């Protein structure tokens, strides 16, 4: 599976961005504060419907807007799927799969799969062994 294209509208610091991607490793390089993590967060949100940075959706909306759009073209097993997630400030989030009629956001779960490794995850490696055991227990259950 890989992400072929990512488009954001009013997500965090981005009014609009379109990003074409290729299979393989993608490296985002740039100065601090220009939005690299926002791109990663948008992909993660599309995959899991949650942010690794905040507990509510409000900070995901660009200041002064009431909704954000995350669109992605995902290629899995040679099949391309277009996902769209509308994140709303005042009503339930909505999704679309292959430009269908709106569906519940949770219907998008499992189509785009991600693994996040964040700096705070180093505590798992460097920290107390009991934390590692608890993590593995939660992973297996």
Image (cartoon, rainbow, N blue to C red):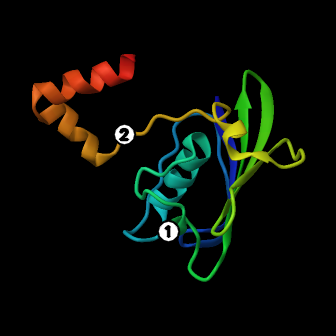
Q: Residue at x 66, y 74 (%)?
A: 66
Q: Which residue is mark 1?
A: 59
One can see residue 23 in this view: yes
As drawn, the residue found furthest toward the top would be: 140
Of residue 92 and residue 108, the one placed in the foreground of this image is 92
Going by the image, does 51 lie left or right of 70? left
* As drawn, 27 above or below 16: above
Pointers 2 and 1 in contact (C-beta within 8 Å): no
Residue 94 percent location from the top left of the image:
74, 53
Neighbours of disc 1 within 10 Å: few (<14), some (14-19), many (20+): some
Residue 100 percent location from the top left of the image:
89, 44
Of residue 94 and residue 29, the one placed in the foreground of this image is 94
Q: Nearer the viewer, mark 2 or mark 1?
A: 1
Going by the image, does 114 lie left or right of 18? left
Q: Looking at the figure, which quarter contains the N terminus?
A: top right
Residue 40 percent location from the top left of the image:
50, 51
Q: Which numbered marker is on residue 20? A: none
The mark nearer the N terminus, 2 or 1, is 1
Of residue 128 and residue 14, the one placed in the foreground of this image is 128
Q: CA distance from mark 2 to mark 1?
A: 21 Å
* As drawn, 130 above or below 18: above
As drawn, the residue found furthest toward the bottom would be: 64
Going by the image, does 134 lie left or right of 102? left
Q: Which numbered marker is on residue 117? A: 2
* Residue 89 quadrant: bottom right
One can see residue 17 in this view: no
Residue 78 percent location from the top left of the image:
77, 24
* Residue 47 quadrant: top right
Q: Secondary structure at mark 1?
A: helix
């Amino acid at each position: 599976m890989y992400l072929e294209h990512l488009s954001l509208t009013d997500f965090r610091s981005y009014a609009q961005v379109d990003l074409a991607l290729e299979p393989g490793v993608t490296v985002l390089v740039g100065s601090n504060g220009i939005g690299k993590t926002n791109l990663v967060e948008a992909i993660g949100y599309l995959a899991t419907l949650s942010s690794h940075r905040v507990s509510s959706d409000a900070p995901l909306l660009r200041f002064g807007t009431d909704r954000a759009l995350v669109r992605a073209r995902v290629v899995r097993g040679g099949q391309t799927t277009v996902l769209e997630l509308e994140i709303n400030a005042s009503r339930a989030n909505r999704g679309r799969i292959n430009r269908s009629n709106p569906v519940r956001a949770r219907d998008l779960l499992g189509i785009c799969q991600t693994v996040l490794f964040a700096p705070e995850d180093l505590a798992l490696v460097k920290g107390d062994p009991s934390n590692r055991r608890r993590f593995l227990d939660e992973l297996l259950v």
